[in-house]
Image (tube, rainbow, N blue to C red):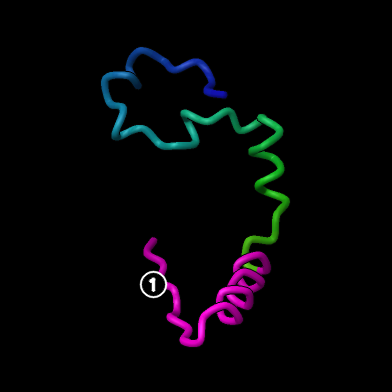
Amino acid sequence: MLGKIREDLQQNLFKTRLTELINMEHPVVKLAGEISWDKMESEFEKIIFRKRKTFYPPPPHYP
């Protein structure tokens, strides 16, 4: 759920940091911080590789 957005941020919606729009105390946000995303990604890669004969590596991550 979104936190209260300050009026000045509404004028600059696309310049606003995502962390200013998201309630960082929300349980789902906290849960996302506890997940080992690297491990999850590697496990999904194994499943994809098994289901396809040819493995296409994921595109590079951009900052």
Q: Is residue 55 above or below residue 63?
A: below
Looking at the picture, tell me which residue is in the foreground, 48 or 33: 48
Whether residue 10 sits left or right of residue 18 in the image: it is left
Q: Is residue 23 above or below residue 45?
A: above
Mark 1 Cα shell of 10 Å, populated few (<14), some (14-19), many (≥20): few
Name the kind of residue labelled 1 in the image: Pro
In which image quadrant can residue 5 be found?
top left
What residue is at 62 percent from the left and 67 percent from the top?
38
Instruction: Locate residue 19, reporting x and y percent.
Output: 49, 36
What residue is at 71 percent from the left and 43 percent from the top?
31
Whether residue 8 sits left or right of residue 58 in the image: it is left
Whether residue 34 sits left or right of residue 11 in the image: it is right
Question: At numbered mark 1, what does the secondary structure look like: helix, strand or loop?
Answer: loop
What residue is at 43 percent from the left and 81 percent from the top?
56
- State the residue position of label 1: 59
Instruction: Locate residue 37, reporting x and y percent.
Output: 63, 61
- Residue placed farthest to the top in the image? 7
Q: Which quarter of the rendered picture does the N terminus lie within? A: top right
What residue is at 36 percent from the left and 32 percent from the top?
16
Q: Which quarter of the rendered picture does the C terminus lie within? A: bottom left
Report the magenta residues as a range.
Answer: 39-63
Q: Is residue 44 above or below residue 28?
A: below
Looking at the picture, tell me which residue is in the foreground, 51 or 62: 51
Q: How many marks?
A: 1
Instruction: Locate residue 36, reporting x and y percent.
Output: 69, 61
Q: Is residue 42 above or below residue 36?
A: below
